[in-house]
């Protein structure tokens, strides 16, 4: 961590930190990095996040030699077709094994599970990151996978609420527009998120849902945050944005930050590490207070000490799934 970054963290005291492949070299290096961040903000429980899904979204893994290769979510779904019990056991055991990697590096929150329900002709940005094409199967597999992380002391972040499965564009580059009816969304896309309404944290989708708001993506829409996510889906935990530096959102970093918070998001997420942008976001975000602060504290209270597990059995499940 550079001197400029340390000074920035001391001055602005961000609630948490998110890491990417560019930040990860070895477990020892990560432990030093996460410790430096917590020392700078003066909070030993400051959350450190990562996207460690498995498959193509795996920040810790090949070609880095220190970490194992983990399967994408869809592999649990394929196993479920022939062995439901084995799939649920594997999802939980492998999640627990992955949590061991994260806790060992000082990482305490994982942006997982993906609860999006892919639809025909949707963009493959979700693809095999989804457990299945069916909402009920997604619910049970995601619940088992997330339970493994919770058992390991890692807090899950459900994503991308209220659903990215119908998007025909990648929100990293373009703004997707979904024109499904409200009834279609309520019957197919929203139920997996409603099943996780008790989750400690959720990440928004940079997607326009014309049935509810024809102009604003969910991240910036008071209608979707307050009426869909909070009321219809019933999510009561900490709501964070997806990365504000993604191309789906227009405007300056300050404008995007202000609009997301005004829409009802509790915290904003900025991921590219550009110092000038981070300073804009920090100034616009201000101090965490009120309901967002209470939700942030409640999210951290959901953490538990790592539970014992059968590590050999988990490794066997992982080997069987990866080799398949």
Image (tube, rainbow, N blue to C red):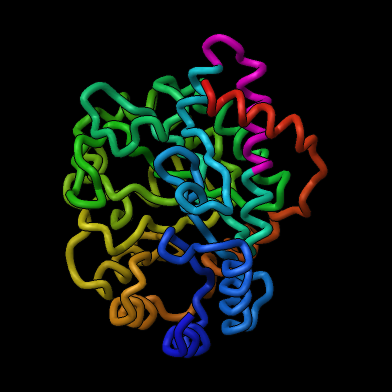
Query: What is the quadrant of residue 250 in the picture?
Result: bottom left
User: Relative to the observer, which residue lies in front, 324 or 224?
Assistant: 324
Decide if residue 234 is in sight here. no
Residue 217 position, x and y percent, is: 25, 50
Residue 230 position, x and y percent, is: 46, 47
Residue 128 position, x and y percent, is: 39, 30
Magenta highlight on residue 90: yes
Query: What is the quadrant of residue 187 in the picture?
Result: top left
282 w.r.t. 219: above or below: below
Span highlighted in magenta in the image: 80-97
Q: Residue at x 67, y 39 (%)?
A: 148
Horizontal side, residue 100 vs residue 165: left or right:
right
User: Relative to the observer, which residue lies in front, 224 or 5?
Assistant: 5
Magenta highlight on residue 48: no
Q: Main secondary structure of the magenta part?
A: helix
Q: Residue at x 47, y 56 (%)?
A: 239
250 w.r.t. 85: above or below: below
Horizontal side, residue 54 vs residue 126: left or right:
right
Residue 201 position, x and y percent, is: 54, 52
């Amino acid at each position: 961590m550079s001197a400029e970054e340390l000074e920035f963290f001391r001055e602005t005291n961000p609630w948490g930190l998110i890491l990417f492949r560019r930040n990860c070299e070895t477990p020892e290096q990560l432990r030093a990095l996460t410790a430096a961040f917590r020392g700078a903000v003066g909070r030993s429980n400051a959350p450190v996040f990562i996207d460690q899904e498995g498959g193509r979204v795996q920040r810790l893994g090949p070609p880095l030699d220190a970490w194992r290769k983990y399967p994408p979510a869809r592999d649990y779904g394929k196993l479920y077709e022939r062995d439901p019990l084995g799939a649920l056991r594997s999802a939980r055991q492998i999640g627990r094994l992955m949590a061991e990697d994260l806790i060992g590096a000082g990482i305490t929150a994982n942006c997982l599970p993906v609860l999006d329900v892919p639809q025909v002709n949707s963009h493959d940005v979700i693809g095999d990151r989804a457990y299945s094409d069916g909402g009920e199967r997604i619910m049970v597999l995601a619940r088992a996978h997330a339970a493994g992380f919770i058992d390991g002391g890692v807090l899950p972040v459900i994503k991308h609420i209220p659903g990215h499965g119908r998007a025909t564009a990648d929100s990293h580059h373009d703004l997707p527009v979904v024109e499904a009816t409200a009834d279609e969304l309520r019957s197919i896309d929203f139920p997996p998120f409603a099943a996780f309404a008790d989750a400690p944290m959720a990440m928004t989708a940079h997607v326009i849902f014309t049935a509810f708001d024809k102009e604003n993506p969910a991240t910036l829409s008071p209608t979707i945050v307050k009426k869909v996510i909070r009321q219809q889906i019933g999510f009561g935990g900490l709501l964070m944005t997806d990365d504000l530096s993604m191309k789906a959102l227009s405007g300056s970093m300050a404008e995007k930050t202000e609009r997301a918070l005004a829409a009802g998001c509790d915290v904003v997420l900025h991921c590219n590490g550009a110092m000038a942008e981070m300073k804009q976001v920090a100034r616009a975000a201000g101090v965490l207070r009120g309901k967002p602060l209470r939700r942030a504290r409640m999210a951290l209270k959901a953490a538990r000490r790592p539970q014992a597990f059968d590590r050999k059995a988990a490794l066997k499940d992982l080997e069987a799934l990866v080799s398949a």
